[in-house]
Image (cartoon, helix red, strand yellow):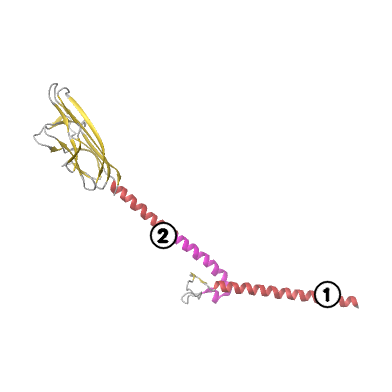
C-alpha cells in the first residue's frame, strides 16, 4: 500500500513538473513574441520610421500589425533597407568622384598646348632678310599645333592659360661665301619684351647656328613671338634649320 501511494505521488510530481515546464515555455515564447512585436512596431516595408515618437507612419503598411507571423520579414526588410541606403550612398559617392575625374580630365585636355614650327619647307635654301626694320617671323611649316595656340599667319603664339611653358628657338644663317657678313640672329619676345636672343654675327664663318631654351611663367593671353632685328637674316629649306617650339609644362591657374 505504501509502495502504491509512493508511485502515485511520483507520477503526480512528474506531471506537475511537466505542466510547469510547458507553462514556462509558453511564458518564454510569449515574452519573445512581445519583444519582437515591440521591435517590429518601429519598422514597415519602407524601412525604419523616424518620426521622433516611435509611431508607425500611417501612410505605409505595417506588416507586424496586420500579420504578426511576418515580423521576421519586417526585420529582414530593415536589413534590406539599410543595405539599399548603403549602396545608394556608395553610388552617389562614386558618381561624385566620376564627375570630379571627368572635370580634371577635361581640364587636362583643355590645357594641352604644344607647337613646333619651322621657317619653311622648300627644297631650295632661301633666306629671310635682312630688312631695314624689325619684323616678326612667321614660321610657315607646322610640325604640331596642339590647341591651335600658334597663328601661322602672324607667327604669334598665344598662351591659352596661365602656366610654366618651355620655349626653344634655333636660328641658322648662311652668308653665301667666305668673307661675307654672317648675321644669324633673332630675339624671343613676350608681349613685345625681349626675353633672350641667339646671335651669331661675324665675317669669319660662312654659316652658323645658335639655340636658346627657356622656361617662362606666362599668363593666359600672353603673346610670344620671334623678332628678326635690323640687319639679321635667316636661311632655311626642307632641312628645317630654323625652328620655334613651345609647350605647356604645367598650368598654374
Q: Work out whether 183 lies above or below 81.
A: above
Residue at horizontal 39 percent and vertical 57 percent from the top: 95
Q: Quarter-wise, where is residue 232 in the image? A: top left
Is 59 on the left or on the right of 179, as rendered? right
Label 2 – label 1 distance at C-alpha = 71 Å
Percent x, y for residue 17?
A: 76, 74
Q: Magenta includes 83? A: yes
Can residue 207 be seen from the camera position used here?
yes
Picture disc at residue 92 = 2
Kindly identify the residue that appears in the image at 55 percent across and 72 percent down: 40
Asked if the magenta segment contains residue 73, the reply would be yes
Residues 94 and 221: in front is: 221
Local SS, label 1: helix
Q: Which mark is residue 10?
A: 1
Q: Is residue 41 left or right of residue 214?
A: right
Q: Residues within 10 Å of mark 2 (few under 14, many from 20)?
A: few
What are the residue bounds of the magenta stretch? 62-89
Q: Residue at x 77, y 76 (%)?
A: 16
Against 66, is 111 above or below? above
The location of residue 241, given as percent across then percent down, is 21, 31
Amino acid at each position: 500500500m505504501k509502495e502504491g501511494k509512493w508511485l502515485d505521488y511520483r507520477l503526480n510530481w512528474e506531471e506537475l513538473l511537466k505542466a510547469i515546464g510547458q507553462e514556462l515555455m509558453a511564458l518564454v515564447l510569449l515574452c519573445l513574441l512581445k519583444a519582437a512585436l515591440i521591435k517590429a512596431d518601429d519598422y514597415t516595408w519602407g524601412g525604419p520610421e523616424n518620426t521622433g515618437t516611435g509611431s508607425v507612419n500611417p501612410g505605409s503598411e505595417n506588416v507586424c500589425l496586420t500579420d504578426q507571423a511576418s515580423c521576421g520579414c519586417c526585420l529582414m526588410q530593415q536589413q534590406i533597407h539599410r543595405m539599399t541606403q548603403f549602396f545608394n550612398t556608395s553610388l552617389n559617392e562614386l558618381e561624385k568622384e566620376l564627375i570630379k575625374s571627368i572635370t580634371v580630365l577635361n581640364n587636362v585636355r583643355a590645357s594641352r598646348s604644344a607647337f613646333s614650327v619651322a621657317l619653311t619647307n622648300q627644297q631650295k635654301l632661301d633666306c629671310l632678310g635682312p630688312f631695314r626694320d624689325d619684323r616678326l617671323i612667321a614660321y610657315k611649316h607646322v610640325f604640331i599645333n596642339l590647341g591651335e595656340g600658334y597663328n601661322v599667319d602672324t607667327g604669334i603664339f598665344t598662351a591659352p592659360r596661365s602656366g610654366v611653358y618651355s620655349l626653344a628657338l634655333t636660328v641658322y644663317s648662311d652668308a653665301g661665301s667666305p668673307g661675307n657678313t654672317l648675321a644669324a640672329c633673332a630675339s624671343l619676345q613676350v608681349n613685345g619684351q625681349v626675353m633672350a636672343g641667339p646671335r651669331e654675327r661675324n665675317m669669319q664663318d660662312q654659316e652658323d647656328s645658335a639655340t636658346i631654351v627657356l622656361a617662362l611663367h606666362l599668363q593666359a593671353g600672353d603673346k610670344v613671338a620671334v623678332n628678326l632685328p635690323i640687319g639679321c637674316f635667316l636661311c632655311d629649306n626642307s632641312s628645317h634649320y630654323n625652328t620655334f617650339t613651345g609647350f605647356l609644362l604645367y598650368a598654374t591657374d
